Image (cartoon, helix red, strand yellow):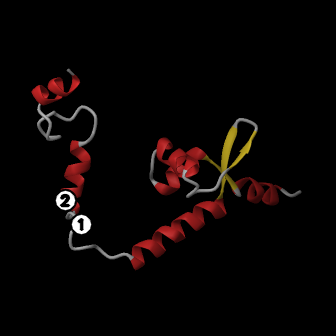
Amino acid sequence: MTSAGLVAEQARLLPVEAVMAQLGVGRSTVFELFSSQQLRSVKIGRRRLVPQSAVDDFVAKLIAMSDTVGPSDDAPAPAVAAQIVASAQPGAPERQRGVTAVARRAAVV
């Protein structure tokens, strides 16, 4: 096999890190996509590899979904959605998450 053929063959199966970079998501998100069967993968030895065609198919499905599903009237505005996500992050002050420290302690007791 020529060196060009070898490079093309290796590029067909991507490591998780390359998928993370292509999709712009973290490792746990990629593994959640595996477990929900939204993204195909293969396992060779201890390595989990993703065919480039699987990444392409996943992106195509996302694009198709975004083309058919428009924003609904009851969906929060992007700025509000970003604030909701940020406030749910670990380490966010209790008050921002809508639960006071007193209420949380009462729920535990």
Q: Quadrant of the C terminus?
A: top left
Taking the spot 15% from the left edge, 33% from the top edge, the residue there is 94
Taking the spot 82% from the left edge, 55% from the top edge, the residue there is 3
Taking the spot 20% from the left edge, 64% from the top edge, the residue there is 77
Report the side of 42 relative to 91 (left or right): right
Q: Quadrant of the N terminus?
A: bottom right
Position of 23 relative to 67 (above/below): above
Q: Along the line of sight, which residue is nearer the eye, 23 or 103?
A: 103
Q: Along the line of sight, which residue is nearer the eye, 16 or 90?
A: 90
Q: Position of residue 39 (x, y in %)?
A: 58, 56
Q: Which residue is mark 2?
A: 79
Q: Residues within 10 Å of mark 1 (few under 14, many from 20)?
A: few
Name the amino acid, label 1.
Ala
Q: Secondary structure at mark 2?
A: helix
Q: Which mark is residue 67?
A: none
Name the amino acid, label 2.
Ala
Q: Which residue is mark 1?
A: 75
Taking the spot 59% from the left edge, 45% from the top edge, the residue there is 16
**Furthest residue toward front:** 109
CA separation in Å, label 1 and label 2: 11 Å
What is the quadrant of residue 90 in the picture?
top left
